[in-house]
């Protein structure tokens, strides 16, 4: 005869095993990103849609060796534009401003243009 404690423990172990198996079986959908690297300046720019498609973000990275003023324009598929700047962006630093229209359900982004890259003074 199994005690109440043993039955309760068995149920907990079974429930945990089920959660673990469900977690392993379900795949996490990754954000969908498109990337551009400027040909002249050490900057990588990405436009990303969250996996749900409902919103997104841009990711701008200063790949240079010096702090710089970096400005960009996100060009959206519907023709609208969204500008941003990061003054005194440290070398190796990234910024990820939100971009609602970058979401695939909201039209998405066509590309990102680098408007300015200038060593900070």
Image: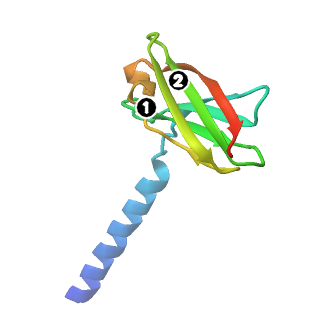
Q: Residue at x 61, y 47 (%)?
A: 88
Q: Residue furthest front?
A: 121
Q: Closer to the camera, 15 or 76?
A: 76
Q: Residue at x 44, y 14 (%)?
A: 80
Q: Which residue is mark 2?
A: 74
The part of the image, by quadrant, that contains residue 98 is: top left
Q: Residue at x 38, y 29 (%)?
A: 100
Q: Are marks 1 and 2 in contact (CB under 8 Å)?
A: yes
Q: Closer to the camera, 6 or 82?
A: 82
Describe the element under mark 2 as helix, strand or loop.
Answer: strand
**Above/below status of 18 relative to 66:** below
Q: Closer to the camera, 10 or 95?
A: 95
Q: Which residue is mark 1?
A: 99
- Residue 16: x and y, percent? 37, 68
Q: Residue at x 25, y 80 (%)?
A: 8
- Residue 113: x and y, percent? 62, 22
């Amino acid at each position: 005869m199994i005690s109440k404690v043993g039955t309760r423990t068995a149920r907990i172990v079974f429930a945990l095993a089920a959660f673990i198996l469900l977690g392993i079986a379900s795949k996490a959908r990754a954000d969908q990103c498109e990337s551009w690297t400027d040909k002249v300046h050490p900057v990588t720019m990405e436009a990303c849609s969250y996996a749900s498609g409902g919103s997104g973000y841009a990711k701008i990275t200063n790949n240079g060796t010096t702090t710089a003023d970096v400005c960009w324009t996100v060009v959206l598929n519907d023709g609208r534009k969204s500008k941003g700047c990061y003054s005194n962006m440290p070398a190796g630093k990234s910024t990820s401003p939100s971009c609602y229209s970058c979401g695939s359900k909201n039209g998405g982004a066509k590309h990102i243009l680098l408007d300015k890259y200038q060593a900070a003074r």
